[in-house]
Image (spheres, rainbow, N blue to C red):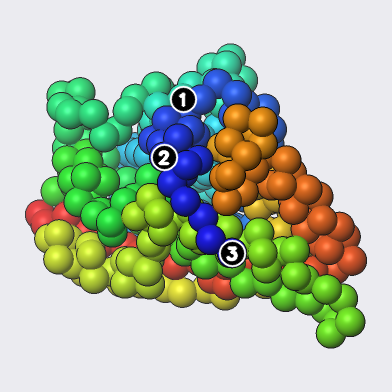
Amino acid sequence: MTTSSSHIDEYDQSKYWAAPARNFRSSARLRLQHLLVQNTLGYLLEPTIEKSVANAKPLKVADLACGNGIWLTELHSYLASNNIPAQLDGFDVNPIYFSHEAYLPPTVSLKQLDILAKPLPTELIGVYDVVHIRALGSIISDADLSPVLSVAFELLKPGGYIQWDESRGDRFVVESPEPQISKVHCDTLVHVLKAGLQAKGIVSDWVENLDTHLDKFGFQNVRQHVQQKRKQDFKGWTEDYLMVWEELAVLFPPRSKMPNAPMSREEWVDLFSKAVGETEQGVVVHQGMVVTAIGQKST
């Protein structure tokens, strides 16, 4: 199956995920995603970082593209249970996911900010002990990480750490629990998605060498961990992806407007429905692993 730019050109990843329509459903999905990543990694702060910043009082952490702030609020609970004072700041271009400050822990602040818009507010420069990034691969084009890494570098204190948790957004492993259970529709759906990502220059092979990118940018003491996703979480990951893919229907043209498009909106909806049916028979889709890379800003 082929795809063309007829609908792909309408997809601007920097705007699509900031649209108001990505609201309570997307926020709920982010909470599921957080649970699944935590099940995979087993930590909030990478252990080397946690040990290195143990004496920071208060510990100042920035979470870039924080979504609904779930990572920060969970980090608050962890730090509070260990009597570690902290200032935990989340930044996202779309505040629609944010809880009202009345319901946030006192250490957590969520602020609207386009982290890629220069210049950064001066009051944020050189402030943080840790800058955390997670699942930002969808806005990385042509494997150019420098815009994101430059922001993290600016925010960090001398000696501060970056922690980036990421999966390959262009890799989907489709598995059937038994040979007689078909996965043909899931395979087809994944093929369409990969073609669309490639058409936009979104190739995520850089994730497997994330540590190399940090090192080349100038971070020191770089380390990388690779954690395989747990089989018992494959169903959850599948459901997480299905919630995203259901929303993609709007990117495909209606048959009435573009009858010769490689895939119409109606065809996508039909394919998606059939793929869901396969997952209800036990077919799963996952990305294999989560990569965490850390690095330190020079002192």
Q: Residues within 10 Å of mark 2 (few under 14, many from 20)?
A: few
Judging by the rendered image, the residue that carries numbered circle 2 is 9
Which numbered disc, 3 or 2, marks the residue that appears first in the sequence? 3
Judging by the rendered image, the residue that carries numbered circle 3 is 1
Which numbered disc, 2 or 1, marks the residue that appears first in the sequence? 2
Amino acid type at circle 3 is: Met
Does residue 284 appear to the left or right of 199 in the view shown? Answer: right
Helix, strand or loop at disc 2? Answer: loop
Q: Position of residue 141 (x, y in %)?
A: 31, 51
Do callouts 2 and 1 mark residues in contact (Cβ within 8 Å)? no
Which numbered disc, 1 or 3, marks the residue that appears first in the sequence? 3
Q: Is residue 9 or residue 289 the one in the foreground? A: 9
The residue furthest bottom is 179
Q: CA distance from mark 3 to mark 2?
A: 18 Å
Amino acid type at circle 1 is: Asn
Viewer-nearest of discs 1 and 3: 3
Do callouts 3 and 2 mark residues in contact (Cβ within 8 Å)? no
Question: What's the mark number on residue 94?
Answer: 1
Amino acid type at circle 2 is: Asp
